[in-house]
Amino acid sequence: MTDNAGNGEGRGRAFFSEPDTAGLMHRAFTRALGFDRADMDRPMIGILNTFSEMNNCHAHFPELVDAVKRGVWQAGGFPLEFPTISLGEIYLTPTSMLWRNLAAMDTEEMIRGNPMDGVVALCGCDKTTPAALMGIASADVPAILVSGGPMLNGHWRGQTLGACTDCRRLTTEYRAGNLDDGEYMEVEENLVRSRGHCMVMGTASTMNSLTEALGISLPGNGAVPAADSRRILLAENAGRRIVELAAEGVRPSRILTREALENAVTLLCALGGSTNAVVHLPALAGRLGIDLPLDLFDQISRRTPLLANVRPSGAYQMEDLFYAGGISAVLRELLPLLHGDAATVTGKTLAENVAASGIVDADVIRAHDSPLKAEGGLAIVRGNLAPSGAVIKHAAASPELMRHRGRALVFNGIADLQARIDDPALDVEPGDIMVLQNAGPVGGPGMPEVGNLPIPRNLLRQGVRDMVRISDARMSGTAFGTIVLHVAPEAAVGGPLALVRSGDEIELDVPGRRLHLNVSEEELSRRRAVWRPPEPVYGRGYGRLFLEHVLQAPQGLDFDFLLGRDPVETMAQPKY
Ligand code: FES
């Protein structure tokens, strides 16, 4: 019999060897699945499957599950697949972020409730990876993450297309009258040509790449395309390795340390990765009892060169990054800035994992001494408009707007924005600063990705393609523009953003890390006295739970009662 926890006390073994009725039932009912005692003597490995036909990014997961199972059987384990909810970015309304915590709870509780000795978590689309990370961190059963991998590049009329940077860019051109209906239809047909998650450095590619820096996935997880046969091998290898990891009793808490989180932030900055990671990593840190303040992101960004020439900050896409050496090559280049001795699920250190890697194409992945930019892609700005901080991805912004003073044009919510943005009578100038209120964690609700406010049609026709935009919302990691996000505290809980009025002057100074509303304290006090919070969107159910317990952006929007972890110990079975 395999000693799956290294001490003869594995959860699967305890479950099947329970005396009397309980053990009999566990074994007899498992035989109904077609397994026998020899199977039940093996360490039980759960395969967390987030497949759903309403999540196109995960469409190929049945094949990956088969590969993981193959690996688990080969290594002497007993694989059992189980579902958790799937969060498809495209299908869910108002925002998939509303359910990230629900998915993390589902993950944690299914790992806790079922007698598995280890788990391989399949993830990929934007929220499924952070949810899996948070769930496995809190349950703390040996685990490896396997993502579905990025899509192949889209191609149209000689252009490489990327989801969904080009969804926005080409829609902007369509709205401006530069594409006709037929061309817009051709874009639709040519944009997403394979399974997998979005293939620019959006939230999904960012988070799945960061799993390599966190040490919780096998090397290759970030960039091997979904359609590449090596993605299947990666899944099979994860199946083999999780059996060893379970036997060694290596739990996520041994891997997901402060050093690992700092490595992830460094990689995030070098990739010009998604601002959504500035929400998801603090949420993960909260589960681990580690403080990951916004200022650490700024500190690390200042010292980390931008190495990945990948959209929306650069010119290429994930498929190109893979051919250029993958995330391992980026990590190897970053080693002087990393905790190279951090433990990983391979059993080797991070530095050992990437030792044999190298840059194959120096235009896609820049060397440490010839970066795309000397500093990483993110900055944290503060001021009387964002006392608890706000985020800007300046690597994907207009350099001429990095220091900007302008007149505020305020929208008091998403409905107001939609109603007025294309009104020909809208009073807006190219130098104005657009402000969106009530789109944060509570106000959104769920902090939807609407921070990249569309440019008013009036200005689009004048050729304007970027303006400073400020909100308490998030934005898609695939978006481009001079966009200040995650303003905290948010407007809906009375943050200063709620007090801005059209015509006020706002000053953004990214090099000085400053965001200031040029309105006197006396006037702000007057406005505060008459401010009233918006009506809650939900009165019952999960929505109400969300509104009552969600934390602000710097704490990662986790629920206050989910902070910390509660490691799963050997299961004590009830006697029947
Ligand atoms: Fe799933 Fe973009 S839609 S990652």
Image: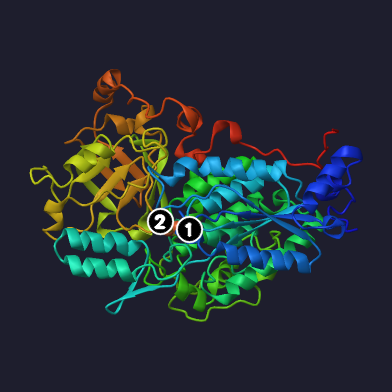
Residue 388, x across and y down, in percent: 43, 36
Q: Which residue is drawn at 55% across and 47% down?
A: 85
301 displayed left or right of 431? right
**Is the residue 18 above or below the residue 430 in the image?**
above
- Judged from this view, the residue extending furthest toward the top is 529
Mark nearer the N terminus (1 vs 2)? 1
Q: Residue at x 11, y 58 (%)?
A: 462
Amino acid under label 1? Ala
Q: Residue 68 carries which label?
A: none
Residues under numbered marks 1 and 2 in contact, where contact means CB atoms less than 8 Å apart? yes
75 displayed left or right of 267? right
Quarter-wise, where is residue 485 in the image?
top left
Q: Under 8 Å from ligand 1: the CB of mark 1? A: yes
Instruction: Choose between 560 and 188: the one closer to the eye.
Output: 188
Q: Which residue is drawn at 73% across and 45% down?
A: 114
Gap in Å between the C-alphas at discs 1 and 2? 8 Å
**Is the residue 12 above or below the residue 57 in the image?**
above
Amino acid under label 2? Gly
Q: Disc count in the image?
A: 2
Quarter-wise, where is residue 290 in the image?
top right
Could you tell me which quadrant the N terminus lies in? bottom right
Ligand 1 positioned in quadrant: bottom left
Question: Can see residue 267?
Answer: yes
Residue 440, x across and y down, in percent: 38, 37
Residue located beneath label 1 in the image? 204
**Is the residue 321 above or below the residue 478 in the image?**
below
Query: How did the renderer colour the structure?
Result: rainbow
- For mark 1, does the 10 Å Cα neighbourhood hold few (<14), some (14 to 19), or many (20 or more) residues? many
SS of the residue under disc 2:
loop
Residue located beneath label 2 in the image? 477
- Judged from this view, the residue extending furthest toward the bottom is 360
